[in-house]
Amino acid sequence: MKLTAQEEYGIRCLIQVARRAPHDADTPMSIREVAEAEGLSQDYAAKLLRVLRQAELLTSERGASGGYRLSRPAREIPLSQVMQALDTPMYGADFCAGHSGHLGACSHQSSCSLRPVWRAVEGAVAEVLGRLSLAELIQQEPAVTSALESNRRAG
């Protein structure tokens, strides 16, 4: 699975806002602060933050002291919801319905052995993303690994 730039940077921007929340929940994080923390242009950071706000993952305040806050606690934001906000599903409804060959439609469509494999992969990824919250992502790598292991044993 390869993340798009929008997915990766969108998650990273959300992590920046989430990391501020426990320490300074009253002060929103500005576009400039998010952009500087992630090494992004302010325009690109603004676009990503707008997408996350439209998905109701963030709230925003206008003005000189405005910026973005999480719409709810990080532990209540599953990574699956973040990914849905930033992109389309891994495989669309028309996945594996055709190919770029000269036939136009897959000659194996009625007895395809690949489609169920990719659907199972999609389901497994969705399951992991649904169990992992933003709160777990703001921790350091060993803690995230531990959370994934705990979720795997519990699931």
Image (cartoon, grey):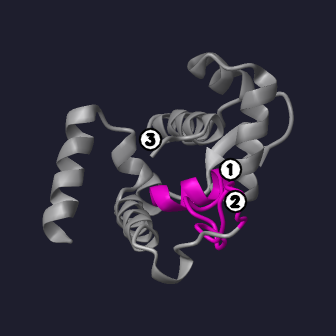
Q: In this figure, which residue is indicated by the disc labeled 2?
A: 55
Q: Disc 2 residue type? A: Ala
Q: Which element type, helix, strand or loop, lies under badge 2?
A: loop
Residue 91 falls inside the magenta stretch: yes
User: Residue 58's x, y, as percent?
Assistant: 66, 51
Mark found first going from the N terminus, 3 or 1: 3
User: Residue 62's x, y, as percent?
Assistant: 85, 40
- Can the viewer see residue 65 in this picture? no
Q: Disc 1 residue type? A: Leu
The part of the image, by quadrant, that contains residue 40 is top right
The part of the image, by quadrant, that contains residue 114 is bottom left
- Foreground pick, 120 / 17: 120
Q: Disc 3 residue type? A: Pro
Query: Is mark 1 in CB contact (under 8 Å) with mark 2?
Result: yes
Q: Is residue 5 above or below residue 36?
A: below
Q: In this figure, which residue is indicated by the disc labeled 1?
A: 52
Q: In this figure, which residue is indicated by the disc labeled 3?
A: 22
In this rendering, the label closer to the viewer, 2 or 3 = 2
The range drawn in magenta is: 78-104
Main secondary-structure element of the magenta-colored stretch: loop
